[in-house]
Image (cartoon, rainbow, N blue to C red):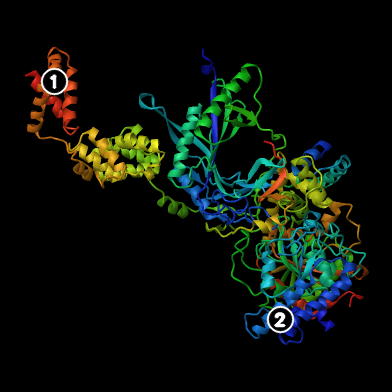
């Protein structure tokens, strides 16, 4: 399986990473190298093997339904790029 | 006083308790060294002398007020530095990235809280590969870290700043994180001792995520004994991390003072760790260390980890997949870098991320996005997860035959800058012996076991069964009692 | 053949019910509505680097309650997954949801369609219900041409309830949505407040010719009232039929309903960029729900509306319609049961009639919920009892109702006695009265005798007027007829 420039553009769009035309070509080559390397996984017979999503076999711990947080808006928004009236501002979103 | 730069944590603790030195004096000693030596190494990327000295003063006060009280941690007043992946309130937390160049964390990571709670004094923040993605520390936005043993060589990564700082005796101890070898490999390349605990032993809260199911924080220091003391303070249940394990607190130093504990220890030697691919100088040092262990009463047995060869490719599916999602929060909306010019929201996202992330981070995000995308998920991600189970099962079987597993930490000693940076796959293979441990969730450590080519340090890796850190630390400690590799420091930095 | 008969409408609904917890699903922030922007957005909610989610136990309890209430399977082990997409009100760049293994699967809801003789029942099957977190809000009013992001809502627990494509008309869709709306409130997992967005529906609508495979569907987003749901689906169906009949294929799309125009329109968001890349969230471990936990939740569940309706029909002899109306809400049912306890089971029908008639009309008129009715259930029962034992007529009963509603008197007996409204049942007194009326209204008497039977009504009216309504009208009528016929 090998990526073409169109694939790279689609992945870059999904990842929200802008790539110039030159970067697209070099990225394609690098990604194909890496994909070529991980390709060896395909040869392994894993029939009947349960996928392992977590390093340890434990179940989710549950939190009591208690409000523990207080307002820290000023702290949090001190590191924000753009705020107004307590809101984070972004370029206009059109639905 | 300058002899203290090579002291163990126990020695420093004793000196502080005996009032031979104050925490303020100790902090100043290291801060002065940092000021003098860091420009040539680039290990520290954030310093704040006033904050550090204020913490030291507080530690002195704690020791003065509570003199002799058992509640005082032996670590109180001892300096350490944090890898810049840990959020530290009031300090810039950059994760080695332009994305977070101006991010001052509004909260402390659990590990930072715990160590500060023990009275440890923070010297500053340590350089690292950007978002912990790298094995050479060349991917940091703040420039590469130099290996104190040879500044033309890499210190390893991603905790390269931590390793270089300890090797150069700019700090007695540091925190690190290990997703595929990021504590052990730099520890090996810089001649240190470092431990990646069992997944879930140390809370990940406040540690900027790379690959959540693999990331684990751990101590880095000169010796196993130092690491045991640090782990005592770092480990423990934290309700804010769902993957933090609820286990009774452990004293990881408990076995250290018992004599001759290695009699009957069965050391497993995976055939796959001793094949081609390991440099001969590394092999020689590791074999010599194993001979030393046999002298200490241990026996060695060959074990098999038949799927370990798949660990690097499986890792390079799972880790980028998780990373691609973990790093989506860096979008320029609530914090972090925002591109100056954009026409609309889509451009604000894609430019902020294109400009804020470095090449390796972007590469991994793209790979991760691809392996999770429609039509490829089963072939890549799910298959890698199944292979992850096979790898974990291999270890389970191996530990039926042995108590600990040993082998090299890294296939080579520290390499020159630029040697692998043009070829991502070659760089990924630097972690060939360490990655399987993360996939299986097992604890692993590296300790210095000699020198190889160009007189560069070699690391011996010890892999333990789940929750077997105390035994591993003791196994390492016994070796360190009969060898002095861990006390060596680079010439010229004394 | 009519156009409607040539087309079959197929509708499936996805409902987001905001769960009634105190704190968010993965953080300890309050979920109270209406706070200043971003003051209820913690480090976890705004996705600061390094923070982690921990699951709220109560949200799971809500899901178990729902699963039990709809007869679904509750997964012994379910998995949280990340749904990855970029949007400014989605701070992590992914939503934590459930994908491959949801907490609840299967089950369904019986809905009633129509009333009276044409009423019918239908069972709407549920595909699944899963736990997930809500996103924040984007405020599009003008901040110098920019959008403001409020993350107070981000992380609010939701149960997304998905039906099979079982509904065949907008009326069925609305009936299902109403039944679901009542149920989630009944079991106390959602406040049902549609204005505040606590209960939001998306409708997947397609049309096909009967017997053909499913058509391409379009999803109408964020229907926040039942009326809009009906209008939106009706418009969408007509639009789709017209498109197909004019030879254009329907393209899968997400559409919004504009209540001002009554039309649906495609969202401008690019659909082609969507690939959610679901994978198990490595920060959250599998959710385990053991049988004993389910049993514990079950023992705390109230009697469910379906079971109550059955009981009202079999034990009280109420009609299916009455039983359904009285179980429209838990408060309604509680009121009925309290009134019944006080009035006696033999009065079930009149109690039901009073609640569904006079009481509901008055509540409606004054915009009150039944729980806030000024007239208590025992007070209403007192009225019914006095009608039953002939102390008052139905007409007087309404006056008693008014008095109690206004707070004049502690119960029906007190009002009746204070105002002297006791019905005159003394035969002698009524006979005298009837004689008076007959004497004073010769014209009506003549008309009646001439064969105009309705003339008796005027005479009854006169008699009632003379007693200010206190005479028993039936008794008066009987006596009048007897005397006239003599």
Q: Position of residue C141 (x, y in %)?
A: 66, 40
Image point (19%, 43%), residue name:
C417
Q: Position of residue B418 (x, y in %)?
A: 91, 57
Image point (77%, 38%), residue name:
A10
Q: Quadrant of residue C382?
A: top left
To which residue does mark 2 refer? Answer: B60
Direction front: furthest residue = C440
Front-lying residue, B29 or C33:
C33
The chain ID associated with circle 2 is B
User: SS of the residue at dot 1?
Assistant: loop
Task: Say left or right for C144 vs C328.
Answer: right
What number of labels is visible? 2
Q: Quadrant of residue C321?
A: top left
Callout 2: few (<14), some (14-19), or many (20+) C-alpha neighbours within 10 Å? many
The chain ID associated with circle 1 is C
- Above or below residue C85? Residue C471 is above
Front-lying residue, B39 or B278:
B39
Task: Say left or right for C117 vs B311.
Answer: left
Q: Position of residue C368 (x, y in %)?
A: 40, 41
Query: What's the distance in space between the residues labelled 2 and 1, CA to CA?
Result: 112 Å
Q: Quadrant of residue C101?
A: top right
Image quadrant for the N terminus of chain B? Answer: bottom right
Image quadrant for the C terminus of chain B? Answer: bottom right
Please tell me the numbered disc located at residue C441.
1
């Amino acid at each position: 399986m090998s990526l073409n420039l169109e694939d790279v553009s689609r992945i870059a769009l999904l990842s929200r990473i802008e790539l110039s035309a030159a970067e697209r070509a070099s990225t394609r080559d690098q990604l194909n190298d890496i994909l070529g390397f991980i390709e060896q996984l395909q040869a392994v017979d894993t029939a009947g093997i349960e996928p392992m999503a977590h390093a340890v076999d434990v179940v989710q711990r549950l939190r009591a339904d208690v409000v523990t947080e207080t307002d820290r808006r000023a702290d949090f928004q001190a590191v924000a790029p753009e705020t107004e009236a307590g809101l984070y501002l972004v370029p206009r979103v059109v639905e | 006083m300058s002899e203290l730069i090579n002291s163990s944590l126990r020695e420093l603790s004793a000196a502080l308790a005996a009032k031979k030195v104050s925490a303020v004096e100790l902090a100043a000693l290291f801060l002065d060294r940092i000021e003098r030596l860091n420009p040539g190494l680039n290990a520290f990327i954030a310093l704040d002398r006033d904050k550090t000295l204020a913490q030291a003063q507080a530690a002195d006060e704690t020791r003065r007020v509570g003199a002799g009280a058992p509640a005082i941690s032996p670590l109180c007043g001892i300096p350490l530095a944090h890898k810049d992946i840990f959020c530290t309130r009031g300090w810039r937390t950059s994760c080695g990235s332009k994305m977070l160049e101006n991010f001052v964390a509004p909260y402390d990571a659990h590990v930072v809280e715990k160590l500060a709670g023990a009275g440890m004094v923070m010297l500053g923040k340590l350089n690292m590969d950007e978002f912990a993605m790298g094995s050479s520390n060349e991917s940091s936005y703040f420039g590469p870290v130099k290996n104190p043993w040879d500044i033309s060589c890499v210190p390893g990564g991603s905790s390269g700043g931590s390793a270089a700082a300890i090797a150069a005796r700019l700090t007695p101890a540091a925190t690190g994180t290990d997703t595929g070898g990021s504590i052990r490999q730099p520890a090996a390349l810089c001649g240190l001792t470092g431990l990646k605990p069992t997944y879930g032993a140390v809370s990940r809260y406040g540690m900027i995520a790379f690959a959540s199911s693999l990331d684990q924080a751990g101590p880095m220091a000169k010796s196993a004994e130092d690491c045991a003391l640090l782990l005592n303070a770092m480990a423990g249940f934290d309700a804010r991390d769902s993957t933090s394990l609820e286990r009774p607190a452990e004293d990881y130093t408990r076995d250290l003072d018992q004599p001759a504990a290695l009699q009957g220890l069965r050391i497993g030697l995976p055939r796959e760790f001793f094949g081609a691919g390991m440099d001969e100088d590394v092999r020689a040092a590791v074999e010599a260390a194993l001979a030393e262990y046999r002298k200490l009463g241990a026996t060695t047995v060959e074990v098999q980890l038949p799927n370990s060869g798949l660990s690097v490719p499986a890792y390079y599916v799972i880790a980028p997949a998780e990373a691609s999602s973990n790093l989506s929060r860096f979008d320029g909306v609530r914090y972090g870098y925002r591109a100056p010019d954009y026409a609309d929201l889509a451009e604000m996202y894609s430019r902020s991320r294109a400009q804020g992330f470095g090449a390796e981070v972007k590469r991994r995000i793209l790979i991760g996005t691809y392996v999770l995308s429609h039509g490829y998920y089963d072939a890549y991600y799910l298959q890698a997860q199944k292979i992850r189970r096979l790898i974990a099962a291999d270890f389970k079987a191996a530990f039926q035959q042995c108590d600990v597993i040993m082998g090299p930490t890294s296939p080579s000693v520290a390499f020159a800058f630029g040697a692998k940076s043009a070829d991502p796959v070659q760089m990924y293979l630097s972690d060939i012996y360490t990655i399987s441990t993360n996939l299986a969730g097992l604890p692993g450590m590296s300790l210095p076991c000699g020198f190889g080519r160009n007189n560069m340090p070699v690391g011996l890796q010890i892999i333990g069964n789940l929750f077997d850190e105390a035994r591993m630390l003791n196994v390492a400690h016994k070796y360190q009692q009969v060898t002095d590799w861990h006390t060596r420091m680079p010439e010229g930095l004394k | 053949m009519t156009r409607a008969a040539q087309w079959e409408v197929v509708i499936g609904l996805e409902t987001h019910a905001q769960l009634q917890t105190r704190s968010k699903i993965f953080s300890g922030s309050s979920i109270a509505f209406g706070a200043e922007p971003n003051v209820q957005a913690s480090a976890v909610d705004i996705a600061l680097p390094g923070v982690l989610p921990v699951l709220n136990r109560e949200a799971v309890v809500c899901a178990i309650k729902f699963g039990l209430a709809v007869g679904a399977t509750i997964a012994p082990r379910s998995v949280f997954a990340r749904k990855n997409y970029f949007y400014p009100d989605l701070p992590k760049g992914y939503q934590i949801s459930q994908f491959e293994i949801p907490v609840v699967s299967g089950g369904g809801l019986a809905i009633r369609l129509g009333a009276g003789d044409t009423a019918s029942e239908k069972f709407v099957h549920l595909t699944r219900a899963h736990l997930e977190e809500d996103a924040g809000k984007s405020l599009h009013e003008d901040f110098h041409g920019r959008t403001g992001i409020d993350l107070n809502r981000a992380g609010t627990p939701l149960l997304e309830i998905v039906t099979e494509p079982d509904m065949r008309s907008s009326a069925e869709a609305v009936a299902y949505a109403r039944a679901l709306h009542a149920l989630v409130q009944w079991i106390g997992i959602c406040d049902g407040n549609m204005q505040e967005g606590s209960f939001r529906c998306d409708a997947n609508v397609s049309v096909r010719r009967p017997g053909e495979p499913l058509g391409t569907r379009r999803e109408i987003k964020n229907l926040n009232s039942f009326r809009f749901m009906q209008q939106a689906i009706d418009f969408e169906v007509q639009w789709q039929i017209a498109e197909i009949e004019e030879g254009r294929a329907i393209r899968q799309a997400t559409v919004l309903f504009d209540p001002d125009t009554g039309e649906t329109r495609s969202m401008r968001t690019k659909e082609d960029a969507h690939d959610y890349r679901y994978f198990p969230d490595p920060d959250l471990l599998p959710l385990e729900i053991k049988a004993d936990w389910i049993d514990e939740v079950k023992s705390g569940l109230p009697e469910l509306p379906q079971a109550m309706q059955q009981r009202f029909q079999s034990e009280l002899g109420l009609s299916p319609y009455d039983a359904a109306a009285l179980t429209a809400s838990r408060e309604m049912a509680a009121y009925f049961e309290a009134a019944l306890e006080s009035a006696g089971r033999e009065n079930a029908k009149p109690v039901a009639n009073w609640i569904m008639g006079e009481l509901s009309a008055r509540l409606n008129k004054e915009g009150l919920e039944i729980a806030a009715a000024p007239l208590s259930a025992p007070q209403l029962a007192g009225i019914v009892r006095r009608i039953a034992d002939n102390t008052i007529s139905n007409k007087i009963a309404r006056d008693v109702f008014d008095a109690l509603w206004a707070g004049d008197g502690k119960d029906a007996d007190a009002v009746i006695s204070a105002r002297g409204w006791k019905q005159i049942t003394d035969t002698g007194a009524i006979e005298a009265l009837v004689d008076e009326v007959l004497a004073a209204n010769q014209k009506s008497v003549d008309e009646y005798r001439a064969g105009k039977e309705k003339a008796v009504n005027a005479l009854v009216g006169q008699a009632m007027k003379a007693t200010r309504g206190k005479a028993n009208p039936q008794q008066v009528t009987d006596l009048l007829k007897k005397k006239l016929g003599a």
